Image: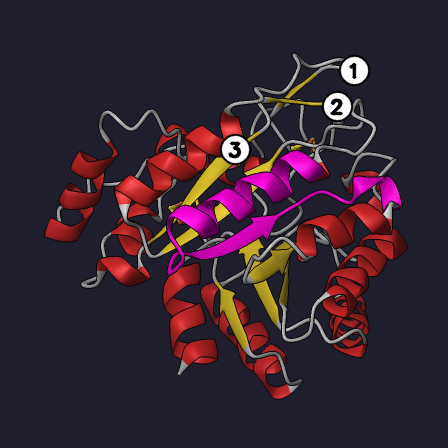
Amino acid sequence: SPEEALELKTVMTPVPSSNNFKKIKNDLRGLNLHTVCEEARCPNISDCWGGSDKSAATATIMLMGDTCTRGCRFCSVKTSRKPPPLDVHEPENTAEALSRWGLGYVVLTSVDRDDLADGGAHHFASTIMKIKQKAPTMLVEALTGDYAGDLDMVKVVAQSGLDVYAHNMETVEALTPFVRDPRAKFRQSLAVLNAAKEAKEGLITKTSLMLGLGETEDQLWDTLKELRKIDVDVVTFGQYMRPTKRHMKVEEYVSPEKFELWRQRALDMGFLYCASGPLVRSSYKAGEAFIENVLK
Ligand code: SF4
Ligand code: SF4
């Protein structure tokens, strides 16, 4: 979700210099597309945009506004009970701009919209359908909320033509009530991932966990086992970083070696691929990983 990139605002990143990065940045001008990558000054931008091959480049776009109806304790996104209404032209305009941009892999994410009867599921799905009409070869990942447990809404998105359905667990079960908004529940999030998997044959499901919130090794093992039980294909691990003093504090800075150890463990458990590292966010080099591990 957007917060994970936005929380990275605090991390300054060197100006990337690869040609591909510059080309993508130039292409973006005039398209009126707002990437989380740029707006959050994500430190991974040169990795995600700057590979040698534009067809594997990944960018993250935020849909449905910048104001969330929830307030998770790790997240710096603005909160309101009644955010402004959806922009009905957003699905069409986003698809048009993305097709002109000619990117390989797009991650669509959004704030949670508990104020809308369908949580914004139809708006999300319609954006995906329009992208696939205008740019059939573009790979699309949707990183969604939990639709307050309404699995029919999960199905609407899962059956819209996307390639990867992502929903973030964020943390282990024991810490969930302290980390996420009270409306977000560990079992409910598992049910979302399970419903997405069942909605469409062959759909890749994906989730992300933050480390450094005080979770134990056993709790992490248990979480990974739960995810494998419902056939989640991809998991990513990144370090929790505190956006401001008002947010939860970091309990531990996990070493790069430990991130690598968890990556290996995840692969040994049967996950298809795993990105893991202090600065990794769920969309980190997602295009490259998908092409290498799913298409080949
Ligand atoms: Fe963009 Fe996500 Fe990559 Fe950051 S990690 S540059 S937000 S695609
Ligand atoms: Fe942030 Fe939570 Fe809203 Fe996601 S649901 S944008 S993590 S407050």
The kind of secondary structure element at disc 3 is helix
Separation (CA) of disc 2 from disc 3: 21 Å
- Residue 274 image point, x, y percent: 53, 71
186 sits to left or right of 129 = right
Q: Which residues are magenta?
A: 122-149
Residue 69: assigned label:
2
180 sits to left or right of 277 = right
Q: Are marks 3 and 1 in contact (CB under 8 Å)?
A: no
The image quadrant of residue 159 is bottom right
Which of the two discs, 3 and 1, labels the residue nearer the N terminus? 1
Quadrant where the N terminus is found in the figure = top right
The residue furthest front is 133
Q: Which residue is mark 1?
A: 81
Q: Nearer the viewer, mark 3 or mark 1?
A: 3
- Residue 201 image point, x, y percent: 68, 74
Separation (CA) of disc 3 from disc 1: 23 Å
Inspect the image, locate mark 2, and give the three-letter code of the amino acid beneath it: Thr
The kind of secondary structure element at disc 1 is loop
Which of the two discs, 2 and 1, labels the residue nearer the N terminus? 2
Between 277 and 36, the one lying in front of the other is 36
The image quadrant of residue 119 is top right
Q: Which residue is mark 3?
A: 91
Vertical placement of residue 182 versus 295, above or below = above
Q: Nearer the viewer, mark 2 or mark 3?
A: 3
Q: Is mark 2 within 8 Å of ligand 2?
A: yes
Give neighbour class at mark 1: few <14, some 14-19, many 20+ (Cα, 10 Å).
few
Inspect the image, locate mark 3, and give the three-letter code of the amino acid beneath it: Pro
Between 159 and 188, the one lying in front of the other is 159
Q: Is mark 3 within 8 Å of ligand 2?
A: no
Inspect the image, locate mark 1, and give the three-letter code of the amino acid beneath it: Arg
Q: Is residue 193 visible?
A: yes
> What residue sits 54% from the left and 46% below the top?
128
